[in-house]
Image (cartoon, helix red, strand yellow):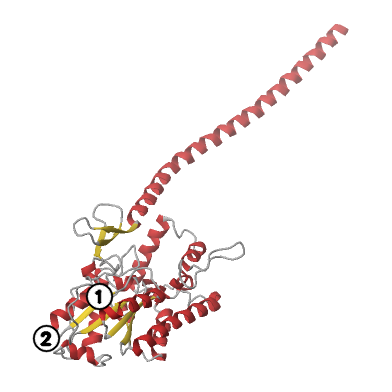
Amino acid sequence: MEAAASLHDGDVGSDRIRRTASRTLGVEQVKSDIVNRLSTRAKYITFSLIPLLVVGTILHVTAGVVTYREVRFEPDSLTGVTVYRTRIGRYPGGHRSRTQLNTRGFPDREYTALPPKGACYHVVLAGDSFTFGDMTDGELTWASLLRDRVAAIHREGCVRFFNVAAPVTTIEEQSRRVRETIDILEPDLVLLGQYQNDITDLTNFGSVAYVPATDSAATTNWGLRLRAAIPGYDSPFPRMLTYLAFKFFLETGTKVDVLNRWSVLADSSNIAYASKLTGLYETFYVGLLQELRARKVRFGVIIMPSKMDIMAHRYPEGAFFEGLARKHDVPFYSTDAVLDANRRPMPYYTYDGHFNERGNRIVADAVYRWLFVEEQNPFGELRQAAGQALAPTYVPRFPK
């Protein structure tokens, strides 16, 4: 009996062990199945992401190639003069431009062998990259087209245009360039081209309002502040999409206002900062104006908006420039309306903020009409020097 009981107990124990082992194996099997299923799903997800990663990489690389911009100064091996070259797009057939500079660095002929002034009327154009004609061939900028049109139409008179503009310059530098050349060029009229970023460019490195970053404060440089404030500012694909969106909005007349980020005058959080910059700008402006008036040289301004201003249907800096001109009795012409009326095709480069060839033609046409055609005559002595004036009803048109 004891042996039978012992045998029974052994069977029961073995059975318990088998059941426990079976349960353990079942749990392990379940775990294994779960792991296998998760592993399979992870593989599916990974494989499904590969095409997206490939497409994303292609888009990123393509955006970098398409939006690539390059600016360089290089000596011409044949003539020895410096040539300003630009490039948009790192691919064959991308946009290229070439502008020959004189020995002073201006997009103009040499000043060392100018003929005597005599009875000729001299007009000096000053400004930043928009008056210089950045990203466009030197002979196709609005300043060059204006010069050529006046020479072609007013053959009996003598009006000479000179361009002392340069990219990335502020009114501080622009005033200095006018002063440096005033005795050489003997201007009767100085026309200052004004653009949207002329106020914030006073914070560029080396300019009067530039302050580097410190442990306790950010830099005053507006460009660096923009990069810090806008996510993806320097990422090629978001930048490409932004450029294309701007083109669509501008050409379709869709009102999209991003000026609170782009314009210091539209940013309500920077009122004191904007006031400081506009005060500095006016100081340089008035200083140049007074010097020119003391020399009996006329002064006028040509105001040019950015594509963001056209897109927003407002131009805060333009209003400031116009107010400054009225305050100091300076003739002015704003190209805002004519560019707004010619939105399509867009008068700016798609992947750059400057006027394209069409934009330069539009501005040259508009400025010509202001100076020589419109009934309001801000510079009568210029029209006299040009010789036979065109009838006020005649409006020359550049090819579209």
CB atoms of marks 1 and 2 within 8 Å: no
Residue farthest to the right?
A: 2
Query: For this view, does 314 lie left or right of residue 105?
Result: right
Query: For this view, does 327 lie left or right of residue 120?
Result: right
Query: Which amino acid does the dot numbered 1 rest on?
Result: Ala
Q: Position of residue 107 (x, y in %)?
A: 26, 69
> In which image quadrant can residue 114 be found?
bottom left
Considering depth in this image, is 350 or 384 the residue closer to the camera? Answer: 384
Say if 311 sits above or below 123 in the image: above
Q: Position of residue 54 (x, y in %)?
A: 39, 44
Say if 318 sits above or below 78 in the image: below
What is the spatial separation of the Cα atoms under label 1 and label 2, in whole angstroms?
Answer: 21 Å
Residue pictured at 72% horizontal, 19% vertical: 18
Q: Is residue 48 visible?
A: yes
Q: Which part of the image, by quadrant, shows the N terminus?
A: top right
Query: For this view, does 224 lie left or right of residue 144?
Result: right
Query: For this view, does 300 lie left or right of residue 13?
Result: left
Check disc 1 and report the residue beneath it: 143
Check disc 2 and report the residue beneath it: 156
Query: Which amino acid does the dot numbered 2 rest on?
Result: Glu
Considering depth in this image, is 289 or 262 the residue closer to the camera? Answer: 289
Mark sitting earlier along the chain (1/2): 1
Q: Which part of the image, by quadrant, shows the C terminus?
A: bottom left
- Tag 2's secondary structure? loop
Q: Is residue 255 visible?
A: no
Considering depth in this image, is 336 or 123 the residue closer to the camera? Answer: 123
> In which image quadrant can residue 306 be found?
bottom left
Residue pictured at 34% horizontal, 56% vertical: 68
